Amino acid sequence: EAGVAQSPRYKIIEKRQSVAFWCNPISGHATLYWYQQILGQGPKLLIQFQNNGVVDDSQLPKDRFSAERLKGVDSTLKIQPAKLEDSAVYLCASSSGGWVRSGANVLTFGAGSRLTVL
Amino acid sequence: DAKTTQPPSMDCAEGRAANLPCNHSTISGNEYVYWYRQIHSQGPQYIIHGLKNNETNEMASLIITEDRKSSTLILPHATLRDTAVYYCIVLGYTGKLIFGQGTTLQVKP
């Protein structure tokens, strides 16, 4: 099966500019996640979608970050305006869900989008 | 969600078994233990998961203690390509994977 697709792979912007990242999950996967990974740290969950609804966005800095998942498939993560501390890799992951019933929730990750804010 | 504790780094000789420990003393009865790894410049990759019983797949074995408070990931014959950061994660009822700092495994020739 095709993996999780993300674009762009690399993006360099000036602070206060805006940027958008796109994610196409594995076909049929109901759950989609966006993680932020700062250099030297583990991935941090920003937002979790179930189909096109938000399950958890408690760690999303909503004053500057926004995310949507149109029609329960593709997703876009936007940052506006960007700050220096937003420099990170933004990882998208998807899973079939179903962990409530089975306890199994295997996430498949994309390669990530590396953002550098100057 | 239960937290996990892992050593920050470990070394292993190529061809030998790599045993990566994880402590999850606050795990609840219905929470699974997951292991992922992240090779440099790639997204995390699923390795294995388990609840109570030991598990084995083509990548690794997972040994969970009887009290479920700790586990060990075993790579039976480590290669240089196994050099990565390994994350032990307890999956809670929310379905969220919360990553810690992980263990950086360096496989040496």
Image (tube, coloured by chain):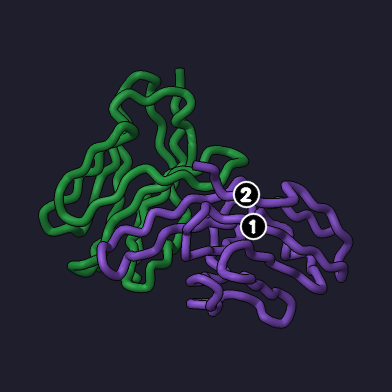
Q: In this picture, is B56 found above or below A43? A: above
Give the residue type at disc 1: Cys
Report if the CB atoms under discs 1 and 2 are less than 8 Å apart.
Answer: yes
Q: Colour of chain B?
A: green
Q: How many marks?
A: 2
Q: In this picture, is B14 found above or below A21? A: above
Q: What element carries label 2?
A: strand
Judging by colour alone, the chain drawn in purple in this rendered image is: A
Q: Which of A79 and A1 is in front in this view?
A: A1
Q: Which residue is drawn at 83% across and 68% down?
A: A18
Q: Identify the residue position indicated by label 1 in the image.
A: A23
Q: Residue at x 47, y 24 (%)?
A: B80
| Left or right relative to B50: residue B99 | right
Can residue A30 be seen by looking at this rendering? yes
| Left or right relative to A1: residue B28 | left
Can residue B2 be seen by looking at this rendering? no
- Would you identify the image quadrant in which residue A99 lies? bottom left
Q: Where is residue B107 in the image (x, y as percent from the top left)?
A: 44, 27
Chain letter for the residue marked with disc 1 in the picture: A
Q: Identify the residue position indicated by label 2 in the image.
A: A5
